[in-house]
Structures are given as C-alpha cells and as structure tokens.
Amino acid sequence: MNTRTSPAPKRPSSSSLLTQWITIVFMLLSGLYLCIGGCWLVAVGGSPYYVIAGIVMLLIAWLVWRATARALWLYAVLMLGTLIWAIAESGFDFWALAPRLDVLVIFGAWMVLPFMLRVFARPRRPGASALLVTLVLCGIALGYAWFNDPQQIDATVQAAALPSAAPPAASDGRMGDWLSYGNTQAGTRYSRLAQINEKNVHGLREAWRFRTGDMKGPNDPLEITDEVTPLAVNGTLYFCTPHQKAIALDGSTGEEKWRFDPELKPDPSFQHVTCRGLSYFETAAAAQARDAGNASKLPLCARRVILPVNDGRLFELDAATGKRCANFAANGMLDLQHLQPVKTPGQYEPTSPPVITPKVIVVAGAVTDNYSNHEPSGVIRGFEVKSGKLLWAFDPGATDPNAIPADPQGYTPNSPNSWAPAAYDAKLDLVYLPMGVTTPDIWGGDRTPDLERYASGLLALHASTGKLAWFYQTVHHDLWDMDVPAQPTLADIRDPSGNVVPAIYVPAKTGNIFVLDRRTGKLIVPAPERPVPQGAAKGDHVSPTQPFSQLTFRPQKNLTDADMWGATMYDQLMCRVIFHRLRYEGTFTPPSEQGTLVFPGNLGMFEWGGLAVDTDRRLAIANPIALPFVSKLIPRGPGNPIEPPQAGQAGTGTEVGIQPQYGAPFGVELNPFLSPLRLPCKQPAWGYVAALDLDTNKVIWKKRIGTTRDASPIPIPFKMGMPMLGGPMTTAGHVFFIAATSDDYLRAFSTDTGEKLWEARLPAGGQATPMTYEANGKQYVLIAAGGHGSFLTKLGDYVIAYALPDQK
C-alpha cells in the first residue's frame, strides 16, 4: 500500500528571516515606546490613542513572529483607525497629518513589498490588498491636504475698496531716498517707487554686493545680529554693522566712500551686539543745496549721520566724509551713560536709531533683560541736534519723569526702557515710543506704581519738551516680557462717516495691533478688557484683565493636545506629555515653578520688523509668527543666590536659557517650546505673511512663508511657514519684499494676492528689513545678509543690491 506523505515545510530563506526579524523588532520597540509613553500621556490627561496603537503594534509583532497573514489585516486596521483619528484631530492640514501618519505609511509600504509578503503563510493576498487600500486612502488624504491649506486665506485686494495710489507731486524730489529706518519717521516701510513692479520683478538680478569685513569675534556674545536697514540719501547709502562701524557706499556701484569705527569693545556678557540703523539730519540750507545740486559745496556737518553704539555712546558724523562733527558734544561723541545708576558697559544699549526732529535727537535704549533689580535706567532723553546739549529727560520710572536728577545716583534704576525704533509726527511734534517692561521681566512683586505706570505700552511725548502727551498700556503688570517690540506706523484712515483720522498702528508681541488716534491716544479699533488666568507666583500678583484688540493675529483658541507636533508620532507623543505637564490656561497664563507655556511666546507674534503700510491704498503687510515659549521660575536656594556673585557683574549674554533675576525671589529659565529632537512642539505654520485692509480692519489674504532648507539636517525646502526676525518693505509697484525667515532667501510677493513672484538665495541669514532707493534713475532693492546668532542662521557680512537689467 502506497502511503502519501506531505512535503516537508519549506524553510524560510535567510533573507526572509532577516526581514521578519527587522519587522518584529520595529513593531516590538514601537509598541513598547507607545504603550509606556501613552500611559504617561493618559495619566496627565492626554489622548489614549498612543496606548491603543502601542498595544496593536505589540500584537502585530506577535503575529509577524507567528508568520500569519492576520498581521497584515491588523496593520490595515491600525492605519485606517489612525487616519480617522488624525483627520478628526487636525483636519486636512498636511503638516499636521504627516507626523501622525508618516512612520505608519512608510512601514505599511514595507509590509506589502514582495520580500516581506513571502514571510507570511498563505493566504496573504486579502490582507495585503486591505493594507494597500489603507495606504491609498492615506495617500489620498495627504495629497488633498498638500494642495488645500486650511490656514491659508486666498483673496485679492480690490481696487474699489482700496483706491490706487495717487501719483507723487512733481516736486517730490525725495521719492528715491530712504531717509529713516522706516523710510520716513512715520515708520511705513513704504516707497512710491514703482520701476520694479509685480509684472517685472521676476527679472531682478544682483546688481552688486559689498562685504563689510565685520564678523563675530571671540569676545562677542551669542546674540550678535545683523538687523540693519540702510539709509539712502541722494544716491549714497549709510548703514552700520553689528559692531556699529558706520559705512557709506555709492548706491549705484556698492563702492565704499568712507567708514568710521567707534572701536566697540564687547564681551560675552553683552546681551546684544547689534545695530538696526543710523539716523540722518540735514540743515534747511543743506536740503536746498542738495536739491539744487550743490551738495559738494556744503560746510562740514551740514549733513550728518547719527550712530548709536552698544556701550552707551552716540556719534555724529559728517555725511560726506565720515569725520566727527567737532561741535557736537565732545568732539562728535555724546556719553549716554551720564547719570545712569549703573554704568557697566553693555547693560545699557541703544540698538535702534534715534528720532531726529529739526532741533532734537530723541534717544532711548535697551537694558539687559532679566539680570537684576539694579540695572540702568530706561530714561528717554532729548539732545540739541547740533550741539548735543541735554534739553529734556523723561524717566519712565520716576515720580516726576521730567526731573533731571542733581543727585549723582542719577536716574531711576530699572525704569521701563524703549529699545525698538520710535516714530515721529512732525505736524504734531509728537514722538511715539514703544515701551518695554521694568526688569526683571518675569517677576514683578516689588514693582512700584511708578515703575508700572509707563511700562509695556505706547508713550507719546512732545518732542521739543519731553512732556507727556499721552500713554496707552497694551499689557498690565507685564510678567511675560510682552512689551511693544516694533516701530509703530502712522497712517491716515477713514472712519465709517468718511472722515480722515490720523491713526497710529501699534503691533504688539501678543499679536494684537492696537489702533489709536495719534493726537489723543484714544482707541479707534476697540480693545475691550477681558479676564485672564490668575494665580501668580508667591509674592506677585496678576492683573485681573488685559486689553484684547479686535484687530489681531493672536490665537483665537487655546492650544490643545491636538495642536502638538513632531516629525514623527514618537516625538509628537513626547510633546503632548510635556504640554500637559506645563501650566497653560491660555494667553497670559502666569509664570510658575511648574513651568508655564507662554503663547504667544516671549519672542512675540510681532518683533522689531513691524508693519509695512501702503498709505496710498491703506493696505498693511504683516509677518506674524507663532512660536510658543516655556517660562519656568527657579526659586532661590543653593547655587541660585539672590545677589550677584560680584558687585557690578555684567549681564548674561543671551535672552534664552537661565536668567538670574538677581534681587527677585526667583530666577527664570526661558526657552522655545521644543521637542527632544529640538523641533517646535506646536504644529506649523510658525510664520506667515498677510495683508490687512486698514479701512475695514480685515485680513485680506494670509500665506505661509519660509522653508526648512536651512533649518533641518537635510536641506529639503518644505514650505511649512517658518519663524522670522525682520520685517517687510512694500512699494507702489504692488510688490513687497521680505527676508527674515530661518531659510536664507530674499523674496518678493504681490501685495494684491500674496503670490510669491521672485526669490534670491542669500549667502547668509537675512534677519534684517529690506529697503529700496533710486540712484542714477534706477531703482534698487537692498538687504543686509549677516545672520543672527541666537536665531542660528548663517553669519556673514554682506550687503546686496538687486535691480532690473539695463534695457539694450
């Protein structure tokens, strides 16, 4: 009798065994990680998804070890469930969906490859088909999300709503100049030049580049930055380098005319080494001579550039030669440390250009953040523009702000400072100063009413006398360093009755844009007071309400577990855990020993770049950012003394990390809210450009800006919407320019639609605001590309001009 025997089972090949074990190890490790991390997340109040996904992965690992095709079915169920969960949490936002799906999609594709399928016993085709269907569904969802950005607003500026710009008067001989930091002292960053426009901007080419030779030195702090916006006067450019070297260039060729070195001697304790710009002054006779073409016959210092230096000095230089103006102060140099209660170099730093009136230089400066409760004063002073004589003082922390102290102790220590550029209305003779908070910034239990009175708001002074005109406070009892960080912008708008109202736009770190009547400080756009979270640290208090402008880019809802992000599900899980372990109850959650999530973050939604406002069409261009920070108070104790180790010790050399706050009961640690992989924990976008209709106070369009090319280990230019430092500049050619992002580009966009029209690769970071000017009948666009130390962009020493090619 013949006996039929079954063939012996086929032994898997060594390659199949390797494939099988790779899959098992991946599933096992992923499952354990997600189970452990997911249990932690559930314990602190987060989503249970990760625990469920972890358990499923462990089951899949067991099924793969058994070589059963049920592993394919279970993986398909995992992917389908994850897709449904991801869409429910984040909608069809590609950069929110991607980290929820990327690892699963990649390994799902691995599971259906032929060499992997050979691992499983038959029948395996139905399971593979089910997994392929879920992969296709994930691909469809991601593809749809890629082309449909829910954060984007698409619209077109309507000419009927915003009338076209009126042509400039024939006598407007200064249209081709850029005379102040914001073009004019109204801070508009708007030029009526239109030779470069939205139809031809794609043809821009590099006209010339200049290298200053000023690079980071061994004694510089981390916070060395090139934030300068040059001036252009009659075809000559004037600018300063990070170490405050003043340089003049020929605007047509980029050839150097002169340079002046103030010989700044920084050290690593300086919180900043930066110069945002110079100021320009000319006598009435000099202006007439320039218009008549007789500028070469002017006496020395009839035209002057004013240079602030980070060690507390101010120079006036002849604009034609760069020589000191001998009749100004002490041979052209003014000592701004006079009557300062603390004279340590680097603790008082005038980093922004002063306001210049026909008679007065209005000077303010930064003080070191979060160092101690005995620092220099934030006093604002007016000096006679030709002689340097002190005309007035406004000490924001003094009982009588206009009193000039006779006591050698000088001005009030730690009084609120004004570090960002100011604006000026010549008709009203009012100077508008964005105010910071008294330091230490993150604890205010011992602040007096005088120290709070003019903090974190907009201060309007009579420029000729220094007397108070009005003050509007944008944050009460500021515990978050939510100062006014940008130059305000003057613009005339129409009220509902059609009447012209002289307004001032005040962008704040909170994302609010406060709109005030610049004559009186009264609100034009309502900003009602709303309750905010309470519960300050021991010895401190919190204001019960804060003003919330109705014109705003601030978050309209609190962050949640679903807003956390990561490159993969693994670091996203950790971000969710960290989020739930922090104190967070929305905007203005008080600092805490637990650690507080600060959103908008300490960097702010607006920074010193400000708005660009087309005053002819009443259209504003903004570039808000959205990057949370973490603020953690550190109680005094061993290793954290309340007093500085040495009397007169200098500052911290940075605005992030541990800040001592000597004299207060707490130090503080400030950092961006990042994952263990050092990626932002809040999902993108982190940066936008947007257009605002100033007649209706509505956002017309909003787009992400910036790619990951220079911010990730692999230089892939994913357009995610990147953080920025720097501002926009706009023109009558219906085009605006901006660099600022953490990738190294200068870009041009249509002001009407937000469409990107042109970009140029920069040799270093462009954390500066561009400008435009005309020389010999040609319009140029210029950017300083020198990078930013703490922003971690590439450092350099470039000034680059772009223009259209000459017509043949």
Image: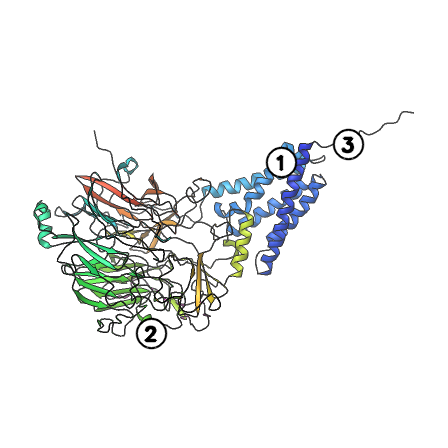
| Residue drawn at point x = 67 percent, y = 39 percent | 21
Other residues around mark 3 within 10 Å, as few (<14) / some (14–19) / many (≥20): few
Q: Which residues are magenta?
A: 519-543
Depth order, front residue of 642/373: 642
Q: Is 535 part of what is drawn in magenta? A: yes
Inspect this view and state whether residue 64 appears: yes
Depth order, front residue of 228/522: 228
> What type is the residue that disc 1 sits on?
Val
- Tell us which disc is closer to us: 1 or 3: 3
Measured from the top left, where is residue 586 in percent x and y?
A: 46, 62
Other residues around mark 2 within 10 Å, as few (<14) / some (14–19) / many (≥20): few
Label 3 and label 2: CA atoms lie apart by 87 Å
Tell me the colour scheme of the image.
rainbow
Label 1 and label 3: CA atoms lie apart by 23 Å
Image-quadrant location for residue 553: bottom left
| Prevalent SS, magenta region | loop
Q: Which residue is mark 1?
A: 112
Q: Which residue is mark 2?
A: 449
Residue positioned most to the right: 1
Q: Which quadrant, please, contains the N terminus?
A: top right
Task: Give the SS element for disc 2.
Answer: helix
